[in-house]
Image: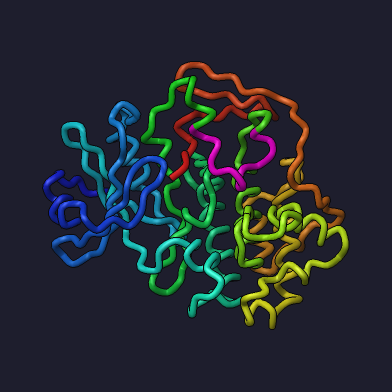
């Protein structure tokens, strides 16, 4: 179970909150070192008015979730108006640092990229299907994938919505995630675990293509990665999509292009045609083949159903599945 720290404890281990690692939607993150030498990342949550009254109970729940591909919650602080979370420190930072800087000396080769993709898939499969209570991340993106000293990838911030309160006026805006990674069914408020599968597909493409899904430095017709991928896929020219600045990716071009077909399956506009994350992990392990007859239109999906909200609960009107706000994880 997670350790309870005092505010002064965390103020001390972070050098008075001076070692900032980054900032996200729900607060700032600072590097620190515990008294036993353990390095940690301390997330200081924002406005107390957004923090659930059940914060302590939910922290216990998140702290009990353990998987090698999920960032571990070590402890927390709930003192006066302060709410902080203490996570294991990931020395190689977030994935975006490694895939979006074209001319850096250290880049991820094909084997590293493939392993990271498999790690992300396993972490999400655990959240979706192996937890006692299903957790949908809803903000899968490279910034929320962290790498340890051995480049093992771990999904972070998968339990934030358990801690953040949502009133009816904010619920959809809060849970929409990050533009560019959001599944098209968000337009009709269909919320299932398949929104994570879609986002995962975008991340896979970004790793293999070595660029952001929206890159304004590109010519206008190549600015949107999914639009370009759609055209190249229909033309049978997926090799053109392999990261041009990564010699190792180029060397393994046919294998990279084959992996892109898994991304196609994850990006199907009809969410019911996408695989589960467990099936994705099985594809990556070589036990299952990617489905044939896939469509290369990833962006537009029919708006069919709306979402009903009642109090703290949200009922997604689709396939008879009820989804509660406590099961969702908001953006970082």
Image side of residue 28 versus residue 248, left or right: left
Q: Is residue 253 magenta?
A: no
Which residue is at a point 51% across and 48% down the rendered structure image? 127
Determine which quarter of the picture holds residue 56. top left
Measuring from the top left, give residue 131's x and y in whole percent. 48, 46
Residue 215 visible in the current orientation: no
Residue 209 visible in the current orientation: yes
Main SS category, magenta section: loop
Measuring from the top left, give residue 67's x and y in whole percent. 43, 57
Query: Front-most of 319 and 245?
Result: 245
Relative to 328, residue 126 above or below: below
Which residue is at a point 40% across and 46% down the rendered structure image? 24
Query: Front-most of 230 and 136?
Result: 230
Write the start and end of the magenta stretch as one range. 174-186
Q: Is residue 179 magenta?
A: yes
Which residue is at a point 13% across and 50% down the rendered structure image? 9
Locate the C terminus by quadrant.
Answer: top left
Determine which quarter of the picture holds residue 319. top right
Which color mode does the image show?
A: rainbow
Image side of residue 138 versus residue 201, left or right: left
Measuring from the top left, give residue 94's x and y in whole percent. 44, 61
């Amino acid at each position: 179970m997670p350790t309870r720290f005092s505010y002064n404890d965390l103020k001390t281990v972070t050098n008075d909150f001076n070692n900032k690692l980054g900032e996200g939607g729900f607060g700032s993150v600072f590097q620190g070192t515990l008294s036993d030498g353990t390095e940690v990342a301390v997330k200081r949550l924002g406005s107390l008015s957004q923090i659930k009254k059940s914060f302590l109970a939910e922290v216990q729940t998140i702290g009990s979730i353990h998987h090698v591909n999920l960032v571990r919650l070590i402890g927390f602080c709930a003192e006066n108006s302060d709410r902080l979370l203490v996570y294991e420190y990931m020395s190689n930072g977030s994935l975006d640092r490694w895939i979006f800087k074209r001319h850096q000396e250290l880049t991820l080769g094909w084997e590293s990229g493939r392993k990271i993709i498999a790690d992300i898939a396993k972490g999400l499969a655990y959240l979706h299907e192996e937890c006692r209570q299903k957790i949908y991340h809803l903000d899968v993106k490279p910034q929320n994938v962290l790498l340890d000293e051995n480049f093992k990838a771990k999904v972070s911030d998968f339990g934030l919505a358990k801690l953040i309160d949502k009133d009816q006026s904010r619920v959809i805006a809060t849970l929409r995630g990050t533009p560019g990674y959001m599944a098209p069914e968000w337009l009709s408020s269909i919320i299932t675990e398949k929104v994570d599968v879609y986002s995962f597909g975008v991340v896979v493409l970004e790793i293999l293509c070595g660029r952001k899904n929206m890159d304004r430095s590109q010519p206008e017709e190549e600015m949107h990665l999914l639009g370009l991928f759609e055209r190249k896929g229909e033309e049978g020219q997926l090799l053109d999509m392999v990261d041009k600045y990564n010699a190792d990716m180029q060397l393994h071009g046919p294998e990279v292009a084959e992996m892109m077909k898994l991304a196609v399956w994850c990006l199907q506009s009809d969410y019911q045609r996408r695989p589960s994350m467990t099936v994705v992990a099985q594809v990556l392990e070589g036990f299952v083949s990617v489905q044939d007859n896939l469509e290369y239109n990833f962006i537009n999906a029919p708006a069919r159903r709306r979402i009903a909200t009642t109090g703290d609960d949200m009922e997604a009107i689709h396939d008879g599945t009820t989804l509660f706000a406590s099961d969702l994880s908001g953006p970082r």
